[in-house]
Amino acid sequence: MQSQEGDDAPANQFSCTQCRTRKLSCDYPQSRRANVGRRKRVHELEAKLEQLERQAKTGDNPSASENDESPPQQIAGESADCLTGGLPYATTSTSGTPDQIQPPLNDKTSFTDLLSLGLFEQPPSQDVIEFLTRTYFEKWQYAAPMLHPIRYTMSLYLPPHMQPPMCLQYIVMASGAEVAKTHRQLAMPFYHRAKAYVEADEMRGDGQFFATVAHAQCWTLIANFEAQQLYFAQASMSLCRAIRIGQMLGLHRVDGEGVDAMSLLSPPQDWSEAEERQRTWWVIYCSDRLVGGSTGWPVMINQQDHSTRTLPDDDLTDLRTSRNWKRHREIDNDLVGLLAALPDDLTLPQNIQSRNATFVNAIIQTSVILLHRAALARIGSSGLPEHMAKQSQARLICAAEEILNIIRMMPDITQTLKNPIMNFSIYTASLVFLENWDTSAQDYRRQDNLDFILRIIILAAKV
């Protein structure tokens, strides 16, 4: 009886008034009880509901977004893998892929317009953009001095349609991240983004979106970045695109006159914009010569197809009246005068901490070596007097030793070796000491210099 009363106790709680007065057992109807599911089942239903909501927002088949291989999606995929953990900014799952933020089909904003505004990945924070841009202009601008630092930095705060193209912004940040120890992990992801954006711009319209000075600058910086990463084949192809865009815009004839010198660009607004166009072309020109000299491939730019003075004749008949040797003496005197007239902030060894000072002095000494090596070749092939060869040899040895002295005084050699032009200066200096000249009295010094160069080359291989 007690057990029966104990069993009826829960039921009595739900008995109605009528049954209670009649002292009858009245159970609460089963149909009115709350159907509480298990916790695991509830989580499964919530996950399924969230998946259905995402599919309803995108309006696309999930399998189609996974198999899409367009350039913007490659950006998002690589960014999601590379830009996780240790970043100064966070990425969200809602902006992981282009399909999740693709506008409806009836929207007036096209897919390519969103691409040009950089809406396919979580952009870096403003602090990261400012830091990497400032790092680029402080540590990498001297290698390709074509962007105006103040104009470019101020343009980043303009409305999106007035800012530089996203491809140029990302390659500038990638170059800055490469030389910044704290953000080096961002260099390759930003490089991939820059290349995907600039390639996507080529597919837009009839060419009006990529035939700009900014895109020529972007391809040049991409080529420099790829060469720094030892991607020489990709660097050559990227430089070819920069050359062709520059020629299409008429950058190689900005100072020319006549119908042939007509440019597709509108007149520059001020002198700084005009100088930026000139600098862009000469950076492209020098890059083409460096690629040709380093790889042995033919150069892409015709040396006579731009608005510059014609080359002097190679006439060696008379040493005093020859235009070739007259031009040789003029260049040699100009280099000596340039070295003596450097401003105080570019002189050595007082400004050995300045990268600009070491770069300028090394380039001047390298120019002296190249000038007199060419003179020695002409002297040997033409049977000219021996005293002329002695003079050039003395100039070569002094310039080569000066380059090594600059390298010895520099506090951070590893950063210097990342600059291909500085590596070229060391290479030209090594050629001087490898020559078999009659300098037996200085053999010990030449051997010490060669040993030092060998150690630098080993260090460069590790860098």
Image (cartoon, rainbow, N blue to C red):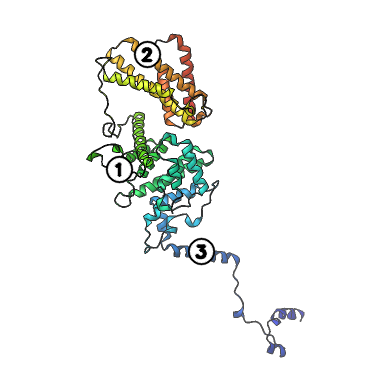
Residue type indicated by callout 2: Gln
Residue visible at 45% across and 65% down in the picture: 56
Q: Where residue 406 sits in the image (x, y, percent)?
A: 48, 24
**Residue beneath disc 3:** 50
Q: Do the residues under discs 1 and 3 have CB atoms within 8 angstroms?
A: no
Q: Earlier in the sequence, mark 1 or mark 2?
A: 1
Q: Quadrant of residue 144?
A: top left
Residue type indicated by callout 1: Leu
Q: Where residue 356 sits in the image (x, y, percent)?
A: 46, 31
Residue type indicated by callout 3: Glu
Of marks 1 and 3, the one in the foreground: 1
Secondary structure under tag 3 reads: helix
Q: CA distance from mark 1 to mark 2?
A: 45 Å
Q: Earlier in the sequence, mark 2 or mark 3?
A: 3
Q: Could one spot residue 177 in this view of the protein?
A: no
Q: Do the residues under discs 1 and 2 have CB atoms within 8 angstroms?
A: no
Secondary structure under tag 2 reads: helix
The residue at the far top in this view is 441
In the image, 14: left or right of 189? right
Q: Earlier in the sequence, mark 1 or mark 3?
A: 3
With respect to residue 294, does 60 lie above or below?
below
Q: Which mark is residue 249?
A: 1
The residue at the far left in this view is 259
Secondary structure under tag 1 reads: helix
Q: Residues within 10 Å of mark 2 (few under 14, many from 20)?
A: few
